[in-house]
Amino acid sequence: MQYKRILLKLSGEALMGDRQYGIDPKRLAEYAEEIKEVVNKGVEIAIVIGGGNIFRGVAGASNGMDRVQGDHMGMLATVINGLALQSALEEAGLQTRLQSAIKINEVAEPFIRRRAMRHLEKGRVVIFGGGTGNPYFTTDSAAVLRAIEIEADVILKGTRVDGIYTADPEKFKDATKFDTITFKDVLTKGLKVMDTTAFTLSQENHLPIVVFDMNKKGNLLKLVSGENIGTVVDH
Ligand code: UDP
């Protein structure tokens, strides 16, 4: 295996499947199978899950809601998704722990770095909910932060496109995909991989990012086995 310990970032929207809102149990079960294949190869895996399928703070703010209040709702949404994912992973026969950045002790462990790392060593899948625990941040930032903290080899950003393109492939037919690209080139070419806070944190801490299509069966395993699918962002 190319990677020993990975952090997988899944957006909340990915959990919607073909729905407009909420969680698609079929999609969750598919993801659980993909994750199980990787765990069975002995790879340690932590997951940060978004909340955009349920609530986004900025959306609340654009409707006149206090931004911080909205972000609190968004963070709780990530805990809901985390619980759903945990349930699907356990259904698939995996051992899991959900750790939350905001205290919600009856439903999730608090985030404790050393404990998270110990869970991983024991082969448990660790899901990080609650984002960073702070408003005005995103779950991409939470993903990079946690990846650095737990000393993950790489952050894998599962999306609906299969990598980073010269332009939006859904709009421009002649857009071409990068197999690899440097952090610097992403910035100079004005490409969007993550929000600036998350991207800079990754760059400064030498954490490579791989953008790949999580919805294609077998892709996660191919990626951790060292196959060149998706786009690798590195120095
Ligand atoms: N959020 C937050 N702090 C964090 C992470 C998330 O306040 O550290 C809130 C924010 O309102 C955000 C929402 O949670 O809009 C859902 O997270 P995100 O938009 O990153 O989810 P995704 O786009 O990955 O589904």
Image (cartoon, helix red, strand yellow):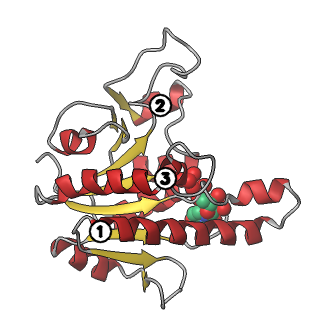
Within 10 angstroms of label 2, few (less than 14), some, or many (20 or more) residues?
some
User: Distance between the Cα atoms at labels 2 and 3?
Assistant: 27 Å
Identify the residue position indicated by label 1 in the image: 91
Q: What amino acid type should be assigned to the residue bearing mark 3?
A: Leu
Residue 131: tell me if it is visible.
no
Using the image, determine if residue 207 lies above or below residue 110: above
Where residue 15 is drawn, which disc sits there? 3
Q: Name the residue that disc number 2 marks.
A: 186
| Label 2 SS | helix
Query: Against 229, is 52 above or below?
Result: below
Rendering quarter of residue 69: bottom right
Where residue 199 sits: x, y (%)? 49, 46
Q: As shown in the figure, which amino acid type bears the numbered disc 1?
A: Glu
Seen from the viewer's position, the closer of residues 21 and 195 is 21
Q: Amino acid at mark 2?
A: Val
Decide: marks 1, 3 in contact (CB < 8 A)? no
